Image (cartoon, grey):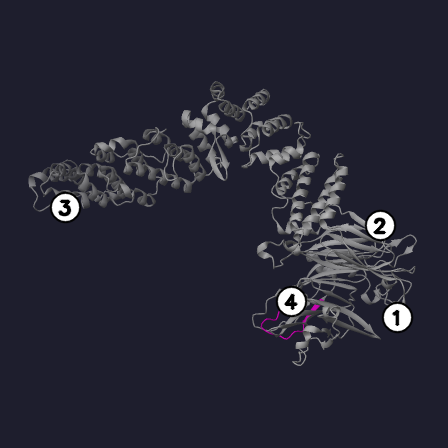
Amino acid sequence: GDYLVTIEEKGKATFLRAYVNWRCMSAGSSRVCVRMVGHKMEESYTETLKEQMSIVEMPLSDPPLCISCCPVNGDLLVGCKNKLVMFCLKYLVINQNLTVLDFERSLILHIDNFIPAEVAFCARHIAITTELDVLILKLELVQQSADGTEQCAHKVSTLEKPVDREDGPSTHTLQLELDEFIICQKPVELLGEESKLCEIPITLESTELPTEDTKHFQVRYLLFRRFTPDQSPFGFCEETKLHSVQLLPLYRTAHEETENKRELLSLFCFFSLPHVGYLYSVGKLVELISTYQYSEKSEQAVLTPQFLHVITSESLQCFTVRCSASAARDEDPYIDTTVKACPPVTLDVCTLRMQLFIGPRAICHFKNHIILLTKADTEDITERRKPTRRMLSRKADSSKTRANSESEPGWNLYIINTVSTIQLYREMVDYSRTYENVKTESCIHLLSEAHLLVRAAIMDPSFLNSDEKEELLRAFRESCAFLGDCYTRFDTKDYHLALPYYRMSGLSMTEVLKRLVSEGGEIQTCERGFIFYLTHSLNEDLDEELSKESANKVLQIFYLADPVQLPHILCSPCMRNVCPLTAVKYLQKVEKFMPSVVLTLTKAFMALKMGDLTLYEHEMDSYKETVLACGFIEQPKLLMQHKEGIVTPTEFAVHLKEMQPGLLVAAAVALHENSKIELEEADTFFKILCSNGESTVPQLLLDFWEALLVVCSQEETLQELLLRVTSQYVWRISKKQLPETKPLKTTEDLINSCNHFGLIFPWVTSITSVGSPSDRDYCEDISKLQSLLCGRSINIASALPVLEPLTEAGSVGLAIRVLCHSRLGKHEEAIDQLLRGCPAAAVRYAHHELKGDHQAVWWNKLLPELCKRTRFAGNDRPVLISSLKAETLSVVAMELELRDFLSLLPEDGTAAFFLPHLLHCSQRKQLT
């Protein structure tokens, strides 16, 4: 809200007034309207409110001592003796063209035996000071009680009393009216939950009319701090008194989509003693951020997001603050990682400027202006703030006569324009260069201050509409680059910060190298920060390629600073243009004292780039294939690199595909099992390597899946792989597609090495043996599919949709259908299928599958079906009769009782045909 609140004295009365629409006075209008707070507007003069200033009278039962306006929502807090009164800002809509500001007294905080000297109010946070005490509270919303009763008052009492008062004198005794005694309590600092123990009970009284939207609050204590007066050998200092309590909000960085919204991010509280100031964060965490030591006694201070301005008896001083550093961490969880950085909150503050003034009395801040009130005389300018002994003793001085300030000469009002952020940033950067060659922390400190200065400006809500927007963003990136330079050139414990600062600067690796390596190629530094930055940048999948000169320079740097990293650095996509001959020379030097498999593989890689196959073969023959496969685990980029987010094969992988596909597949399996590559990434890798389309599965990828099945232990991945290989087998068989390369493993190899592939059942072999000659071209895929279904790992129910294309594919389809029925326990359906499609295999199936609990299918299904089908003449009749006579009847006769056996025989059957089996059954019974 655009209003002005004053505490005015007239005679012996004190008034609280709000001036609304006050800008009309500066525009030349002299009309003034006076009204009481909450007073209903009269229709007769509402239309004139647009052009006149309104004075809103706010009557209080006790004289107002101090006031504070909330910068977030415009609410007003008034401090009186033993209480605080809160007025809510309201917007009264008179008509379509007129909205008037008004206030409503909504809440009173009763605080016994507490006389506030200053208050600060922001976003329901309240900071109160007496002469030596500071109390910070938060008003938290609470739900209305379940029965709907109004909670108009909420009592907050202390949980516990300090131990040192239990056996000590009473409060009455401590307040004896004795001039010769000064009673001082111990200094105390209570943060968070502990601040409840401050023994300052607070009662809330709601004063607004109860409605459905009435808000109910409770008090949460955030901080309590008590100071003691300064003491010296020369006497007792009575001028120790707190001043300038202030709550400063910082908002979330504005973006285009949130331009008109201000979201509170962090909150800070400042208060000061004459010689030291304190800055606390009171948002998510209550903690002391900074302590300010003044060179002389301070009179007043004002805190801004960028600076702390302090006036003394003779000067205006300016200090840096850490609000933006703290707020940045509240806003961005990636601060203090390898992605982003920000100077620490604990960074020492420093004095920026000190300007001399005669007799500063008061100071305030607005945007980029400092308003300073001074009085040029020789009297004690602190007279108005000289503390009484009211806090120390109940006996107070009588009321003092007030000097008539209006008649006193020497008053001056200064409006000081602060230096623009960009100009001050440039000055700080220029000054930091004086320490550049000394390589001290002072250079980093100054650049950190400059960075925080710019960061605070960017976090300002008006940043998006600022004329300096683009210049501030450039300065931010530039400051990040300067800090990156410091952490790479200086040997500091925080050398790792070079990486996030360079990332935030937006500089490419080539640009960073130009900053740190002279044009003549001379390496200016090899400090830990530089190596840390290069190592992380090169090990990441960046799309940037260094030039040949830059890559060779990086090679030289690592050979001198960290030769162990050379093999890994050479595998980076950024080093694609490095001279392979130079690389091999450096690797050979390193190999003499630090040989490794990765180094050997890297030498082979460089040999391929040079086209030296003799050297390549020599290096690859140095280790067995299993050891080489493990070497790829240590450095996967020898085989695959990410380009624009897609995994792509290297020249090494292309060569292995042609010459040693088995090693390539083994290496890919090892990478997957060691979580170096995901299954989907491996699919893309092999498809790109074999130049296949997205929908086509190359044989090498199928080889990878089959090899992965041998070692895979995760059930979810296992089932996914089983379905993938099944789908590929089915696709090839149904499309009559031959593999483009020879498979690495035969069916026998898979059965011997992988327990997910089972021995093919004899009855399956008998079915496929009568298949068409064309099926023999795909016998390997057919046998692998059958072996997979004969195993016990694949989930048949999940595989049925995949197997659908083969259901009508002759003998192959019949074998697949029967296998599925068998795995699902549907033996009767399987027998029906066999009797229709391949009767000769029915008895073999029964011998293999119908055992144990399924043995009854012999006489309940197979015997009746055989008898039924032999009645009809046909080509299969001899096979059916043979199956019935030679196998089925013998098994039934061995398992059933004679009476049960007789009941199964057909009534129209030939007695001579069944008689031998009846005799056998009868004799078996007699023998047993």
Magenta stretch bounds:
202-215
Nearer the camera: disc 2 or disc 3: 2
Q: What type is the residue that disc 3 sits on?
A: Leu
Q: Nearer the viewer, residue 167 or 205?
A: 205
Query: Which residue bears the numbered disc 1?
Result: 399
Q: What type is the residue that disc 4 sits on?
A: Phe
In the rendered structure, does residue 197 fall within the stretch colored magenta? Answer: no
Element type at mark 2: loop
Q: Give the numbered dot on residue 904.
A: 3
Majority secondary structure of the magenta segment?
loop
Element type at mark 1: loop
Query: Which residue bears the numbered disc 2?
Result: 295
Provide residue 634's location: percent of width, then percent of height. 52, 31
Nearer the camera: disc 4 or disc 1: 1
* Chain-order first, disc 1 or disc 2: 2
Res 759 visible = no
Provide residue 53's location: percent of width, then percent of height. 72, 73
Whole-number angstrom distance, CA of label 2 to CA of label 3:
116 Å
The reply to whether the C-beta atoms of the residues labelled 3 and 4 are less than 8 Å apart is no
Query: Which residue bears the numbered disc 4?
Result: 217
In the rendered structure, does residue 212 fall within the stretch colored magenta? Answer: yes
Q: Give the answer, above or below, for where 162 lies relative to 562.
A: below
What quarter of the picture does the C terminus occupy? top left
Nearer the camera: disc 3 or disc 4: 4
Res 138 visible = yes
* Chain-order first, disc 2 or disc 3: 2
What quarter of the picture does the N terminus occupy? bottom right
